[in-house]
Amino acid sequence: MRALIFAAALLLLPQVALADYLKAPAEEDIPHLTDLELCQHHFVRPMPKIVDEVESRYLKCDRLLEMAKQLKQEKKSEVVKAYVSAQQRVLDNARIRADAERRERLELERLALERERLAEQRRQNDIALQSQKQANNAAQRQASRDDGNTALQVGGFAIDALRFLGYGW
């Protein structure tokens, strides 16, 4: 009957607990165990050598195991805090990246608008320059016509003067 209970217990124990249970310390290793390891073995397998070592060290295993349990809980909370802070760092980094991308996108949009504004201004300046050139060309043509008319008029006056003076044609 005992063998059946032992076999059922072995089948029901998780592998880690089973591995720990099967790893009993050798008698020569017992003096080198830490107090916590010694107390854990004391409760799992009260071998006479382990019991003697616990008594020789004046250990209060129940208190020691309780303190270890509390420390483990505190470490878990520290691990949770570290995990939360790591998640917060990841979120902060993602937010920083998103802000940088948004700023870059806005800067590119601003530059595109500025480029369009400058292109429109350049087109307007080209149109104004073209119309100014046309006006200058028209003024030059008018001036050359006026000069030609003036020359004709001056030439006509000169011919009239020469006729008057008796150099007739």
Image (cartoon, rainbow, N blue to C red):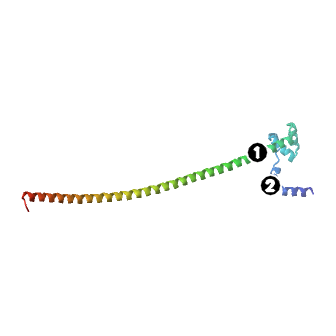
Which is nearer the N-term, disc 1 or disc 2? 2
Percent of width and height locating residue 103: 56, 52
Crowding at mark 1 (Cα within 10 Å: few <14, some 14-19, many 20+)? few
Q: Is residue 138 left or right of residue 40?
A: left
Identify which residue, 121 or 116, lies in the foreground. Answer: 121
> Residue furthest toward the right?
1
Q: Quadrant of the C terminus?
A: bottom left
The residue identified by callout 1 is 75
Closest to the camera, between mark 1 and mark 2, is: 1
**Residue at position x 88%, y 55% from top?**
6
Mark 2 — residue?
Answer: 15
Residue sitting at 9 percent across and 59 percent down?
163
In depth, the one of 32 and 76 nearer the eye is 76
The percent coordinates of residue 17 (x first, y second) are: 81, 52
Q: Quadrant of residue 36?
A: top right
Indicate the secondary structure of the residue bearing disc 1: helix
Q: Amino acid at mark 2?
A: Gln
Disc marking residue 120: none
- Farthest residue toward the left? 166
Q: Residue at x 13, y 57 (%)?
A: 158
In the image, taking residue 159 as reference, residue 7 lies left or right, namely right
Q: Is residue 104 left or right of residue 115?
A: right
